[in-house]
Image (tube, rainbow, N blue to C red):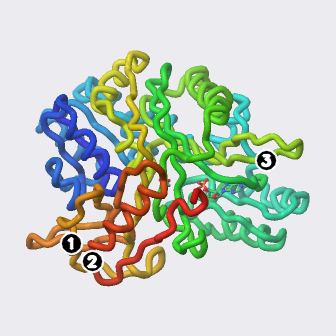
Amino acid sequence: MNILLLGSGGREHAFAWKMSQSPLCKKLYIAPGNAGTGQFGENVALGVNDFAAIDQFVLTNKVDMVVVGPEDPLVNGIYDYFTASPTLNKIPVIGPSKLGATLEGSKAFAKLFMVKHGIPTAAYQEFSAHNLEAGLDYIDLQTPPIVLKADGLAAGKGVLICESKEEAKAELREMIANAKFGKASAKVVIEQFLKGIEFSVFVLTDGTNYKILPNAKDYKRIGEGDTGLNTGGMGCISPVPFVEEELMKKVEERVIIPTVEGLKKDKIVYKGFIYIGFMQTVQPNGTTEPMVIEYNCRMGDPETEIVFPRIKSDLVKHFVALAKGELQNEVIEIDERAAATVIVASGGYPENYEKGKEITGLDSVKNSIVFHAGTKTENGKVLTNGGRVLAVTSYGKDIQEAVATSNASIEKIGFEGKYYRRDIGWEFK
Ligand code: AMP
Ligand code: GLY
């Protein structure tokens, strides 16, 4: 098969690495890709949201399947674009329909879906310009911290955790009346703060059947000890030590099954990944319960960089079955080893940083897989080209061993301003 993969981050390098191992994958194109994806296929200069150009490319190059990495093209309806086109509608798109992607594209839509299908999540209300005053009154009834979420996509920045009612009210006004996050905050979800530990579960579904992939925990803060600004993720681990069988049973029965059944009942076409963010909460009666913080309509980044290395079976074969609605016959084989990925970032990230620094030592890494995130090649040199530059993944008998191996590999890599967290997985020592 000829496959077109959309995206350009560490996640897409991991997709390319994994899919290119499949005997079913004859030719892999990555649009636009990065210096790493180019090792496994041909990078092509297409924008992930330029559906007309993708359409042309797919027909000209006889592409048999399109795999979507990031959320934007899904939220913009690439699945529907393909199904509506007489020349493209036989070509499967791995990813949900536009309505399915709304689970990520609109927090209010996701909350309503969860309430409707009895899926445990924080209590909430939604507000916009017509009931801003009611929103301010609602804040008065809450006990801080108070969580405000821009309804739409806001590049991972749309969630604010306010320590006082005054701060929450000021932020609500900023979001709704002053468009703090542009159109994305025209509507705002205010929800109950959940206390606990976060973890993520990944599901592959054809809309009827589902398969659970390895779980993960990511480390979002820039600084060691989980301090400083939020980032896209500075590293992650799999499996999460506290996510044991009993907890996974609750996750499956209370969340995964009602989610897949809910999609079906609501006639939401969904053939792709569901990434479910959880908080493991302690209830007033002392029981621990998993509650959903968010849905994403795609795989995570950097979670993919450990989840895929822990899948031994053929991902492309799973995608073919998924497209046919026959996922029930697939066996996802999991590597029992632990895996960790540590992000190597440009100094200054997530604020201002410089690009274009030469990266050295990549060839001397022998015990880890180096996935490229923000990189580019120029005159045969690999240069930094983003905030998160590399994701260095290793296996180990446990999390600590995997993290130590990644850290040792990173010591062999150099570029001006190189920064990474040495403490990924710190709470599982
Ligand atoms: P999201 O963009 O929905 O992933 O939210 C970003 C981050 O905000 C999450 O990963 C959590 O750390 C935090 N968060 C979101 N919702 C809540 C909540 N209801 N209670 C506590 N923390 C939350
Ligand atoms: N690592 C978080 C995300 O992909 O959304």
Q: Residue furthest left?
A: 379
Q: Quadrant of residue 79?
A: top left
Provide the residue designation for mark 1: 361
Disc on res. 17: none
Looking at the rendering, the quadrant in which ligand 1 lies is bottom right
Give the image location of residue 243, x and y in percent.
Answer: 61, 42
Does any portion of residue 81 appear in the rendered image? Answer: no
Q: Are marks 2 and 1 in contact (CB under 8 Å)?
A: yes
Disc on res. 282: 3
Q: Secondary structure at mark 3?
A: strand
Provide the residue designation for mark 2: 414
* C-alpha gap between disc 3 and disc 2: 43 Å
Q: Earlier in the sequence, mark 3 or mark 2?
A: 3
Amino acid carrying label 1: it is: Gly
Q: Nearer the viewer, residue 109 or 315?
A: 315
Q: Is residue 151 left or right of residue 383?
A: right
Q: Nearer the viewer, residue 426 or 311?
A: 426
Q: Quadrant of the N terminus?
A: top left
Q: Secondary structure at mark 2?
A: loop
Mark 3 neighbour class, 10 Å CA radius: few under 14, some 14 to 19, many 20 or more: some
